[in-house]
Amino acid sequence: MEIEVTVLTVGPIQTNCYIVNKKGESSCVVIDPGAEEEKIAAYIQKKGMKNEAILLTHGHFDHITGVSGLISLAGGKVYACEKEREILMDPNMNSSALMGYEVALEPEIFLRDRQKFTVAGIEFEVMHTPGHTAGGCCYYQREEGLLFSGDTVFMESVGRTDFPTGNSRELLDSLRNKILTLPPEVQIYPGHGPDTTVAYEMANNPYA
């Protein structure tokens, strides 16, 4: 199985939105459509694909603002970690209210830590990685060695913990005892900035 990963950088905070599909297949999934849903939908349509799912790594406004618009334009059921429900539903907690608008959404499918699910022909494994938010998670594609990490880890850095439900001790635990225990060749696709690998972060991340 070969998986294609396309990144579209969207919104005022330059969020990485990922479109993931199995090579040769006509369906895809979208991870963290934070804004610019028209741009995301246009790419999907240009490629002749059908969106099957929207996977959310966490509930902050810059990762969820484009969700409802993308559903209207391209479809897809929304997945998120069950422990992130409160943030997703509360515009103050997800910081959309601070940006001058309100986003509140309830995913159709809530996921648990270590749960495996298959969508668009691709099996993902949920890794609950609290710290940036209480219900933050990563999506791991074991066969191809891909990890969509949201804002838990970035190249040579980690996510902030000064937002609601953030916890620096939990974040370091998620990084050191979950993400960095994966095989060194695993490719990490973060919520912002360039992609990286487990090996690179083990050697270069000051929080490792």
Image (tube, grey):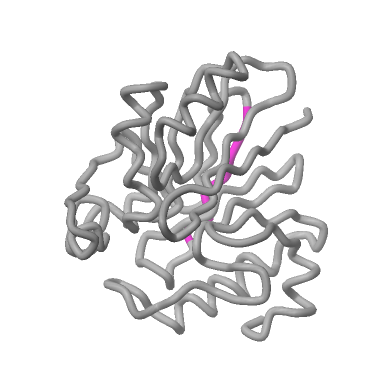
- In this view of the protein, which residue sits in the foreground, 65 or 116? 65
Any magenta on residue 21?
A: no
Left or right: residue 108 versus residue 98 is right
At 78% across and 60% down in the image, what residue appears?
Answer: 183
Image quarter for residue 94? Answer: bottom left
| Dominant secondary-structure state across the stretch colored magenta | strand
Residue 105: which quarter of the image? top left
Q: Which residues are magenta?
A: 122-128
Residue in the image at 75% along x and 75% along y = 202
Rendered location of residue 17, percent (x, y): 52, 45
Q: Say if 205 sits above or below 96 in the image.
A: below
Q: Position of residue 175 (x, y in %)?
A: 59, 72
Q: Position of residue 100 (x, y in %)?
A: 18, 58
Q: Is residue 126 magenta?
A: yes
Instruction: Say left or right for 165 vs 151.
Output: left
* 33 or 164: nearer the viewer: 33
**Quarter residue 72 falls in:** top left
At x 58%, y 68%, the residue is 153
